Amino acid sequence: MRLHLIACLAGFFAATTALGQGAPAPRMPSADGSAVKTPEVEPQPQTKTRSIGGGKQEQFVLPSGNIGCIYTPEGGTPTYRPLDGGPELACDRVEPRYVRATLSASGPASLDRQVGDASCCSATSVLDYGQTWRQGPFSCTSTRTGLTCEREDGHSFFLSRRRIDAN
Protein backbone atom coordinates (compact mmCIF):
# COMPACT_ATOMS: atom_id res chain seq x y z
CA MET A 1 0.00 0.00 0.00
CA ARG A 2 2.78 2.44 0.91
CA LEU A 3 4.61 1.62 -2.29
CA HIS A 4 1.44 2.33 -4.32
CA LEU A 5 0.96 5.70 -2.51
CA ILE A 6 4.61 6.69 -3.13
CA ALA A 7 4.28 5.79 -6.82
CA CYS A 8 1.10 7.88 -7.14
CA LEU A 9 2.71 10.88 -5.42
CA ALA A 10 5.80 10.58 -7.65
CA GLY A 11 3.58 10.52 -10.77
CA PHE A 12 1.62 13.54 -9.53
CA PHE A 13 4.85 15.42 -8.76
CA ALA A 14 6.28 14.65 -12.22
CA ALA A 15 3.07 15.79 -13.93
CA THR A 16 2.82 19.09 -12.03
CA THR A 17 6.54 19.81 -12.49
CA ALA A 18 6.22 19.26 -16.24
CA LEU A 19 3.21 21.60 -16.38
CA GLY A 20 5.07 24.27 -14.40
CA GLN A 21 7.94 24.14 -16.89
CA GLY A 22 5.68 24.50 -19.92
CA ALA A 23 6.08 20.86 -21.05
CA PRO A 24 2.95 18.78 -21.64
CA ALA A 25 2.01 16.40 -18.85
CA PRO A 26 2.62 12.72 -19.44
CA ARG A 27 -0.35 10.57 -20.40
CA MET A 28 -1.71 8.95 -17.26
CA PRO A 29 -3.74 5.74 -17.23
CA SER A 30 -7.35 6.01 -16.12
CA ALA A 31 -8.99 3.69 -13.57
CA ASP A 32 -10.01 1.27 -16.34
CA GLY A 33 -6.44 1.13 -17.74
CA SER A 34 -7.03 3.21 -20.89
CA ALA A 35 -4.87 6.26 -21.49
CA VAL A 36 -6.40 9.64 -20.74
CA LYS A 37 -4.88 12.54 -22.60
CA THR A 38 -4.38 15.59 -20.46
CA PRO A 39 -4.99 18.96 -22.10
CA GLU A 40 -1.88 20.59 -23.52
CA VAL A 41 -0.66 23.78 -21.94
CA GLU A 42 -0.26 26.70 -24.34
CA PRO A 43 3.23 28.13 -24.28
CA GLN A 44 3.54 31.50 -22.58
CA PRO A 45 4.63 34.38 -24.81
CA GLN A 46 8.26 35.24 -24.29
CA THR A 47 9.00 38.55 -22.65
CA LYS A 48 10.86 40.85 -24.98
CA THR A 49 13.77 42.72 -23.51
CA ARG A 50 14.99 46.01 -24.87
CA SER A 51 18.69 46.65 -24.84
CA ILE A 52 19.82 50.05 -23.68
CA GLY A 53 20.93 51.96 -26.72
CA GLY A 54 21.35 50.28 -30.03
CA GLY A 55 23.75 52.75 -31.53
CA LYS A 56 27.30 52.19 -32.51
CA GLN A 57 30.35 53.95 -31.23
CA GLU A 58 32.61 55.76 -33.68
CA GLN A 59 36.36 56.04 -33.22
CA PHE A 60 39.09 58.06 -34.86
CA VAL A 61 42.72 58.95 -34.26
CA LEU A 62 44.93 61.80 -35.33
CA PRO A 63 47.75 61.04 -37.80
CA SER A 64 50.34 61.21 -34.98
CA GLY A 65 48.61 58.33 -33.16
CA ASN A 66 48.92 60.33 -29.93
CA ILE A 67 45.25 61.36 -29.70
CA GLY A 68 42.21 59.15 -30.22
CA CYS A 69 38.48 59.69 -29.69
CA ILE A 70 35.38 57.58 -29.10
CA TYR A 71 31.89 58.92 -29.76
CA THR A 72 28.96 57.19 -28.02
CA PRO A 73 25.47 58.07 -29.32
CA GLU A 74 22.50 59.02 -27.16
CA GLY A 75 21.25 55.96 -25.28
CA GLY A 76 24.66 54.33 -25.39
CA THR A 77 25.41 50.92 -26.82
CA PRO A 78 24.55 47.42 -25.66
CA THR A 79 27.84 47.34 -23.72
CA TYR A 80 28.30 50.95 -22.58
CA ARG A 81 25.91 53.65 -21.44
CA PRO A 82 27.16 57.11 -20.44
CA LEU A 83 26.09 58.18 -16.94
CA ASP A 84 23.81 60.92 -18.29
CA GLY A 85 22.48 58.78 -21.14
CA GLY A 86 24.68 60.32 -23.82
CA PRO A 87 25.70 61.36 -26.30
CA GLU A 88 29.31 61.46 -25.18
CA LEU A 89 32.65 62.25 -26.78
CA ALA A 90 35.82 61.09 -25.01
CA CYS A 91 39.30 61.78 -26.39
CA ASP A 92 42.57 60.47 -24.96
CA ARG A 93 46.02 62.00 -25.28
CA VAL A 94 48.86 59.55 -24.67
CA GLU A 95 52.04 61.67 -24.48
CA PRO A 96 53.63 63.32 -22.57
CA ARG A 97 51.09 62.22 -19.89
CA TYR A 98 47.89 60.27 -20.38
CA VAL A 99 44.79 62.51 -20.15
CA ARG A 100 41.15 61.96 -21.11
CA ALA A 101 38.91 64.88 -22.10
CA THR A 102 35.15 64.25 -22.16
CA LEU A 103 32.17 66.18 -23.43
CA SER A 104 28.82 64.86 -22.22
CA ALA A 105 25.29 65.79 -23.24
CA SER A 106 25.45 68.93 -21.05
CA GLY A 107 27.80 70.87 -18.82
CA PRO A 108 31.43 71.79 -19.32
CA ALA A 109 34.09 69.48 -20.69
CA SER A 110 36.01 67.49 -18.09
CA LEU A 111 39.63 66.37 -17.87
CA ASP A 112 40.67 63.12 -16.21
CA ARG A 113 44.38 62.87 -15.43
CA GLN A 114 44.04 59.54 -13.55
CA VAL A 115 42.57 57.33 -16.28
CA GLY A 116 42.06 53.80 -15.01
CA ASP A 117 41.25 52.24 -18.38
CA ALA A 118 43.87 53.76 -20.66
CA SER A 119 43.14 52.29 -24.07
CA CYS A 120 44.10 54.80 -26.70
CA CYS A 121 44.70 54.69 -29.77
CA SER A 122 43.91 51.68 -31.92
CA ALA A 123 41.24 53.09 -34.23
CA THR A 124 41.84 52.65 -37.93
CA SER A 125 39.85 55.73 -38.95
CA VAL A 126 42.29 58.66 -39.20
CA LEU A 127 41.11 62.26 -38.96
CA ASP A 128 43.74 63.93 -41.14
CA TYR A 129 45.08 67.39 -40.33
CA GLY A 130 42.70 70.04 -41.59
CA GLN A 131 39.64 67.75 -41.44
CA THR A 132 36.58 68.13 -39.23
CA TRP A 133 34.54 65.23 -37.81
CA ARG A 134 30.86 65.79 -36.88
CA GLN A 135 28.38 63.56 -35.07
CA GLY A 136 25.44 64.38 -32.82
CA PRO A 137 26.04 67.72 -31.09
CA PHE A 138 29.85 67.41 -31.39
CA SER A 139 32.49 68.44 -33.89
CA CYS A 140 36.27 67.97 -33.80
CA THR A 141 38.89 69.63 -35.95
CA SER A 142 42.33 68.11 -36.39
CA THR A 143 45.34 70.37 -36.97
CA ARG A 144 49.11 69.86 -36.76
CA THR A 145 49.02 71.74 -33.46
CA GLY A 146 46.30 69.60 -31.81
CA LEU A 147 42.65 68.60 -31.66
CA THR A 148 39.77 70.96 -30.86
CA CYS A 149 36.38 69.40 -30.03
CA GLU A 150 33.23 71.31 -29.18
CA ARG A 151 29.56 70.81 -28.48
CA GLU A 152 26.92 72.94 -30.20
CA ASP A 153 26.48 75.09 -27.06
CA GLY A 154 30.13 76.19 -27.11
CA HIS A 155 31.67 73.93 -24.43
CA SER A 156 34.91 72.49 -25.74
CA PHE A 157 38.34 71.01 -25.12
CA PHE A 158 41.73 71.19 -26.80
CA LEU A 159 44.38 68.46 -26.68
CA SER A 160 47.97 68.55 -27.90
CA ARG A 161 51.36 67.38 -26.69
CA ARG A 162 52.05 70.86 -25.29
CA ARG A 163 48.67 71.92 -23.93
CA ILE A 164 45.30 70.75 -22.65
CA ASP A 165 42.28 72.97 -22.03
CA ALA A 166 38.63 72.33 -21.20
CA ASN A 167 35.60 74.57 -20.65
Image (cartoon, rainbow, N blue to C red):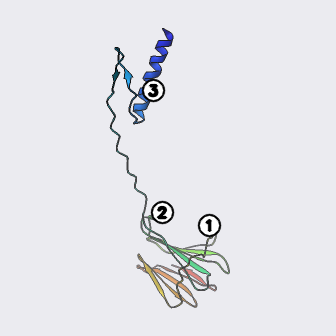
Identify the disc placed on residue 133: none
Image spot of residue 102 (x, y percent): 52, 73
Residue located 49% across and 16% down the image: 6
Mark 1 to mark 2: distance in Å? Answer: 16 Å
Q: Secondary structure at mark 2?
A: loop
Q: Which residue is mark 3?
A: 14
The residue closer to the viewer here, 139 or 19, is 19
Mark 1 to mark 3: distance in Å? Answer: 52 Å
Could you say which quadrant of the image residue 158 lies in? bottom right
Image spot of residue 142 (x, y percent): 52, 87
Image spot of residue 41 (x, y percent): 34, 34
Could you say which quadrant of the image residue 152 lies in? bottom left
Q: Secondary structure at mark 1?
A: loop
Q: Which residue is mark 2?
A: 81
Asked whether the beta carbons under mark 1 and mark 2 sit within 8 Å of each other, the answer is: no
Asked whether the beta carbons under mark 1 and mark 3 sit within 8 Å of each other, the answer is: no
Number of callouts in the render?
Answer: 3
At label 2, the amino acid type is Arg
Image spot of residue 18 (x, y percent): 42, 31
At label 1, the amino acid type is Asp
Identify the disc placed on residue 117: 1
Q: Earlier in the sequence, mark 3 or mark 2?
A: 3
Which residue is situated farthest in the top direction here?
1
Q: Earlier in the sequence, mark 1 or mark 2?
A: 2
